[in-house]
Amino acid sequence: MSQTVQLVDTLKKLLRERKITYAEVAEKLNLSEANVKRMFSKRHFTLNRLEEICDMAGADLGYLMARMHEGTMVLDELSEEDERELVSDPKLLLVAQLLVNRWEYEDIISTYVIDEFEATRLLARLDRLSIIELLPGNRVKTKLSRDFRWIHNGPVYRFFEQNVARDFFNCKFDPKSGELLVFVAGMLSRQSNMHLQNSIRRLAREFDELSKEDGKLPLEDTFGTGMVLAMRPWELSIFAEMRRGPNLKKF
């Protein structure tokens, strides 16, 4: 398969993931939907066209190329059964998180109360779940794609609701301590909402890229860091209760 075919196929996959239709692409490019379909079927794009379509999906050409060259990192989502197994064992979830963040086997067993036998057993389970590929000498290669996602409202989401959210926000959010909380509210159109969603995706990818790069540094130079990005059409409940009638407007 030529690189052109792979690149366009990757772009089509990205549009499907972002739920962007050919009609929306046509409107963005000021073309007919038929012309857009022809562009994709013949795989004939100018560089400017590619950049415009990537921008709609909150990406750039560098990201598109990286997605195309992911190779064996093909896992976009776990099954619900696999997610349940992952959250059923806190040590399994811990080791998975550490490995994805490039911790070495020796650092894990020296930092946490996990002996070599248990660590090897956990690595084998993560290999079976296809989260990692277990290599000789207990070395690992992660197999999660750059756009790996948890099942919406699945076991990991529920685990987050029950265990993570309250713990994460139990904080003074002091910028001098590497903490930051920003809250804004206002009225947005659907178009502006989508624009900000794309910006959030770009920021999340930047976090991921920095995390992978900093994973090469010594552990004493890095800090476990969490970042929550969220947006929703929303009104504070105490304000909603003051309405004369229920807000029936749908996004």
Image: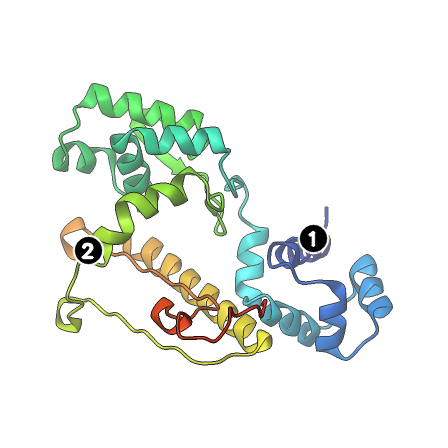
204 on left or right of 189: left
Residue at 24%, 52% (x, y): give it.
166
How far from the left and from the top, in percent, is residue 44? 79, 65
Residue at 18%, 38% (x, y): give it.
107
SS class of the residue under badge 2? loop
Q: Nearer the viewer, residue 151 or 104?
A: 151
Snapshot quadrant of residue 174: bottom left
Residue 134 can be seen, yes or no = no
How far from the left and from the top, in percent, is residue 163? 27, 44
Residue at 53%, 64% (x, y): give it.
62
Q: Quadrant of the C terminus?
A: bottom right
How far from the left and from the top, in percent, is residue 235? 42, 71
Q: Residues within 10 Å of mark 2 (few under 14, many from 20)?
A: few
Residue position marked by numbered label 2 in the rendering: 223
Q: Amino acid at mark 2?
A: Phe
Residue position marked by numbered label 1 in the rendering: 9
